[in-house]
Structures are given as structure tokens and as C-alpha cells.
Amino acid sequence: MPFDVPTVEEMSALLPQYVFERLAAFGGMGAVYKARQASLDRPVAVKILPPAFGAEPEFAERFKSEARAMARLNHTNIVAVYDFGITAEGHLYLVMEWVEGHTIHELIQKGIIPVRKVANLATQLCDALHFAHSHKILHRDIKPGNIMVNQEDQVKVADFGLARPITGEAEENPYGTPDYAAPEIMNKGAVDQRVDIFAAGIVLYEMLTGRVPRQQRRSVTEFAPVSARWDEVIAKATDANPALRYQDVRDFRTNIMMAMSQVASAPVPTAKLVEDSEQTPRSFSSVQWAIFAACIAVAAGVGFLMMPSSDVKQPEDTKVVQAPVVVEKKVQAEAPKKVKPAEIEVVTVKPDEKEVKQAPPVKKTAKPEKTVEIAVASVPVVKAPEPPPMVKEPPKVDLSTLEERDAELTQLLASFSAEWETNAELNTTPARKELAAKYIPALQRGLTGLPVDQRDHVLSEISQVANNTPLSEPAESWPGVLKQLRKTYDEQIGAINSKSEAAAVATRAAQSAAVVALAQKRTAAGDMEGAKRAELVSAALMKVKGPPSVDAIKEVGGKL
């Protein structure tokens, strides 16, 4: 072990408020245990650092500061921090949410991850980083081993042990894992959010290919059947020059979504028909159907003539030779007049002869005296019933039974809704709550010394903000300082809404494109009903306000 890692029993003695179950992982920077918080009866992960770190006052103080910052990162895709401190033996420790699942590193070791799942995991990683960056915190050690994926395929970014505030300052000592560290880290240059974007780009490449890129980086298409569009996205995210990278992780996320939708909407290649009747079955044209029917009719007629009758006796030793019917094989559907009719063959039977001889084909039928002629004439083309026409328009469908009839679309909508809820720009509830947490105390401080009628207005304002209900217009009797507070609040709410609307337009377009691609795929497979249902969902997505839940889609889809 890289340092003297305490046993489960020793940890139980050091932190008796937790019931330690097992050592989950360890390395040079610490160890992680699975434990249970006795007071709340919930599973937790307890990470400890070697005592040498706790012995340095500057490091210990910085650890506490960063632990407090991490505790504020309350996001779906970030492992929650519950507690921190230092043990009696000098181990700095963090108590975090326990995630039951696997790291992305473990998923990669099992085999290449499907591209749709890669895109899903990568966008969730971007959401987590955006939330951290918006709170001025860098992770600085993004790698597959630090990204958990629970049993619902939900990303949980862990191990903010190297996290620090975004200051743009240079680092004196390189840190992190070299394979994922941006060049400016290794060159001791100034760092900001772009170092996390660089590392996320490397993680994306590794998920697609199953390997860490080397210089020169090889195309993802060499290792996986994916579009070269992914190379463009990764190249921009991992550019050696920070100025040429995505400057905001949200831009990186948008391009991942676009790459996924473009790949999904690409036309499905179809096999070229092989002009070989022995290998490839062909469908008959209407003319060919007619010729086929004519042949059947001829065969039936000749067979009838050949059948012996009980009323007519065949002369003994008399042989009947059937004249073959020749049918022209090359038929042009556009000009049936040019079809060369089968030549008429005449069989002449003389009463005095015992053997029937075959007459040569002639253009015109002649009737010699004292001869019996049996002529097999060319059969007129009889139009056989054509196969039922292809249904050009898919059957009418509705979305009222979407969940029962289309599990694939239902699951896709659930992922869209989850994406909406976890996107800080689309889901404005956290931002509104954060703004309300500042606005309400400011209003409360302004209550001091106000007349009763003015106090009632302000108390009503506080109640409306707290309950997220529409606010009334400020009364004329409001003091100027409170009016200014309200103006500032309205401006900030407007900015939140404006940003949310812009993000909603882009997200709706990307989600709608993904459903259109599914409709195209279904059309190519001949599932016209499923394709029509996907088209309705795509149209409904563009009209839904807010998260695209199944219920919201059904409601809007019923009006289309």
C-alpha cells in the first residue's frame, strides 16, 4: 500500500459515527471506504488523505476551504459531500454520497461503449462541469476513474480532491493525471475552466475508442464504426492552444449533441440489387405478371387438349406430338405493342396415316383438303390482378397510448426530460431559488421602520417570491430602496429567463432532430406506423413548453 492505510476496525474507532464496512479503493493520494452513517442509516463513502497532508497547516486549511466549496455543489451529476474534518491520527477526511455502480474506467475495460451511451455520459459530464465552473470551481483531475455511473446510467463526478477556485493563476507544480492534463498544466502556465474541457475531451475519445490518445492522435473511426464528426469535436476540445478550445463547457456539450444527431440522421446505406436471377429474387412487373398468367393459361389449355376422352378413341399406334409454345422473354413495359407474338405452329393429322407429323411454323394458317388442323395460336395477353399498391401514407396514429405502444420513444423522451431537468440553463428552479435566497433577506432588512401599509406590501412580496408565484407591481408607497431592489430582481429574473429560452430553442431542435432520425430509421425498416408516431413526437417537441415529459408530449400531440 502507498501509505499506512487504516483497517476497517481502526477507522471505526477514529470515526465512531460511521459504521465502516469495507475498504473500497486506495492509492497514493488516499483511501476510500464504504460505510454507513448511523444517524441517518444511509450508505456513504469516506475518503481519507495520508497524515502527511494533515500535518501541513496551509494544506489543511485549503482542504477545509475546498471541502466547503464542494459541499455547495449540489447537482445531480456531482457526488454530494456530507461532511469533512480531520481524525485524531491526522487524516483529513471527506464523507460523500455512496454511488452503487461502476466508474467509466471500468466500463471501458469491459469493451467499447455504444456511441449513444457515450453521448449521454459525456453530456452529463459537461452538465456537472458547467455547474462547478459556474460556482468558480475547477475539478482539475477529470478522468474515467473519477467519473461514476450508477445503475440508472446517471453520471456522478467524484474526487474533487484537487479542486480549486477558478482564478486564472499559474500553477507552480504540475498536478493531476498526465494522460488527461492539459499542456498548460504541464508547462506551469495559467489555468482556468479550459483544463477541465481538455480532460473531458480525452475521456470522450477514450469512451469511443477504448484507449487513451497518443501523439499523433489517431482517428476514432479506426477503432469504432462512428462518424468522423467525433474527431472534429474532440480535436477542438483538446487543442494544445487553450484559445482554440471550446471556451465554455456548454459549447462542448452542444457539439456533442449535434454530432450525435447528425450521425443518427445520416441515410442508411442500402444494398444494390444484383442483376442475377439465380441469386436475387426479383419482383414481377405488371407486364411480367401478365405473361406469367398467359403461360399458365397456355399450359392449362394444352393439357386439356392432351387429356384422353372417354367419348373419342385414339387410333392405335397414333402418336401426338405437341408443338412447343415459344414466349418472347424480353418485354418492355413501356411499349407492349413491340412484343413479338409467339409464332403459330400447325399440327396436321391425315386420316390415312398412323403417325402425326409436326408441321413447320408458318405465318398464315392454310387449310389443306382432307386434313384436320389443330392450331395453337398465340394467346392474347390477359392482365393479371396486380399486387396491392404500396401504402404511401402511414396509418393514422395518435399519442394517447404512447407508453403502451412505443417503449423506445417513451424511453427516449425520459432521457430528454432528465437532460432538461439537469441542465442549469433549462431548469431555472435552482437559479430562481438562489436569487430568492438573496432577495428575501434584503426585503426583510428593509421592513425596519416602514409604516404598516408599506409593510403589508413588502410581506406580500416576500410570500410571493418564496412560493414562486407571479409578483404584483410595486406600490407607489414603496420606499425608493425597495423599488430599486425589485428592479434589480426583475432584471436578474429576465436574464435567467432569456438564457433559458435560448438554451431551450437549441435543445428542442437537437432533441427533435434525434426523433426525426428515429423516424427515418423506422421508415427504412418499413415500420410506417412507428415512423408516423416518431414524426408526431418530433413536431410536439417543438411546441412543448418546459421539460418534454411523456404527458406533455401527449397533450400537445393531441392538438396537432
Image (cartoon, rainbow, N blue to C red):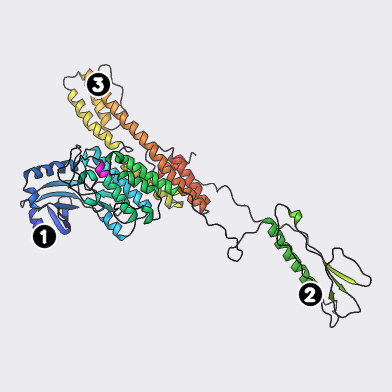
Res 42 seen here: no
Q: For this rendering, which residue is in front, 19 or 427?
A: 427
Q: Which mark is residue 390?
A: none
- Whole-percent x, y for residue 557 in the image: 47, 41
SS type, badge 1 = loop
Q: Quadrant of residue 295?
A: bottom right
- The range drawn in magenta is 189-197
Q: Nearer the viewer, mark 3 or mark 1?
A: 1
Specify the amino acid type for callout 1: Thr
Badge 3, how many Cα within 10 Å: few under 14, some, many 20+? few
Q: For this rendering, which residue is in front, 271 or 457?
A: 271
SS type, badge 3 = helix
Q: Which mark is residue 307?
A: 2
| Circles 2 and 1: CB atoms closer than 8 Å | no
| Circles 3 and 2: CB atoms closer than 8 Å | no
- Whole-percent x, y for residue 72 in the image: 20, 40
Q: Earlier in the sequence, mark 3 or mark 1?
A: 1
Which residue position holds label 3?
484
- Whole-percent x, y for residue 408 in the image: 42, 52
Which residue position holds label 1?
7
Q: For this rendering, which residue is in front, 34 or 242?
A: 242
